[in-house]
Amino acid sequence: MRRAGILLFAAVPVVVAGVLYAVGPGQSGSADGGKDVSAGREARSGDDEVIADAPPGLAAPAKKELAQRLVASAENSTLDWRSAYGYIEDIGDGQGYTAGIIGFCTGTHDLLTLVERYTEAHPDNGLARYLPALREVDGTDSHEGLDPGFTAAWKAEAKLPAFRAAQDEERDRVYFDPAVRLAKLDGLGTLGQFVYYDAMVFHGPGTSPTGFYGLRERALKQADTPSDGGSEKHYLDVFLDIRRKAMKSKRATLDTSRIDTAQRRFLHDGNLDLRTPLEWQVYGETYKVP
């Protein structure tokens, strides 16, 4: 399970017409506590053609599976990411309950959105009765109206294929698809796409200095992306440096091994295609994918 003290700032950005292809339609809220606009990249003519012509990269089925395993090693200390559908606990990070395969949080809007969308398709589900309480605690760490039954209801619902599919869909809609799309538009290969995805998961899709889009904007001031003629390795080095500092700014003792002995290792090995076999360490534990 997720280690206490490993902060997850997951939420959903506001989308404004003409801004940011990287964020799906219908999302609201923000990644880092405010109601700010996600302006990570303005739409450009020809972007759809760029995506269509790009190799599958991290979106290829085998690579997407690998991405989930890599994230799970950092988020849940396991490679079996599917074991986390029923996971739920308050890890004391100020975000309320953290739950599910990507760490949806009661305090950061994305868990509320997940349950709302799931309830639209399945009105009689076991979580629907908690929607009023979820709306009340959104943006806080409060459990009011959720205890004592919400955690048991989540675990029970997570046994159902429909709710597991809903978690998959929301993960892709809010985190995976926007990150991979923007990485491809930036000219990044499979590793770079994963670097964006992991940052989106951990920092949330927000525009503050520690939100994903804020991190990217800061990186762009120091290095050109490959699509702008820059070195892919140099750009990713800069992005990871900025991300690591952002993590440490939250708490100096925060573990950054998901960067230091995982992503940075792959980058320094020149594994821009994220080829297997892979070996990495997170929180002192070693993981291998053949």
Image (cartoon, grey):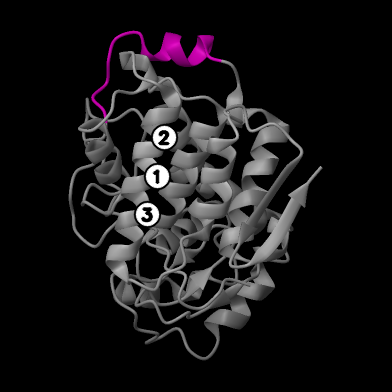
Residue 136 drawn in magenta:
no
Disc 1 target residue? 240
Q: CA distance from mark 3 to mark 1?
A: 6 Å
Residue denoted by label 3: 244
The quarter in which the N terminus is drawn is bottom right
| Image-quadrant location for residue 88 | bottom right
Query: Which comes sooner in the sequence, label 3 or label 2?
Result: 2
Q: Which mark is residue 5?
A: none
The residue tagged with tag 2: helix, strand or loop? helix
Residue 79 x, y percent position in the rendering: 72, 57
Which secondary structure, mark 1? helix
**Above or below: residue 67 compared with residue 260:** above
- Inter-mark Cα distance, 1 to 2: 6 Å
Circle 2 residue? 236
Q: Counting other residues with Cα less than 10 Å from the Cα at mark 1, is it few (<14), some (14-19), or many (20 or more)?
A: many
- In percent of the image, x 34 and y 27: which residue is there? 21
Report if the CB atoms under discs 3 and 1 are less than 8 Å apart: yes
Q: Nearer the viewer, residue 151 or 126?
A: 151
Viewer-proximal residue, 25 or 193? Answer: 193
Which residue is found at the position 34% from the left and 77% from the top? 94
- Which residues are drawn in magenta? 41-54
Q: Can see residue 6? A: yes
On-image quarter of the C terminus: top right
CB under 8 Å between callouts 1 and 2? Answer: yes
The type of residue carrying mark 1 is Leu
Q: Amino acid at mark 2?
A: Leu
Contact, mark 3 vs mark 2 (Cβ under 8 Å): no
Q: Is 134 or 90 nearer to us in this picture?
A: 90
- Residue that appears at 38% across and 78% down: 133
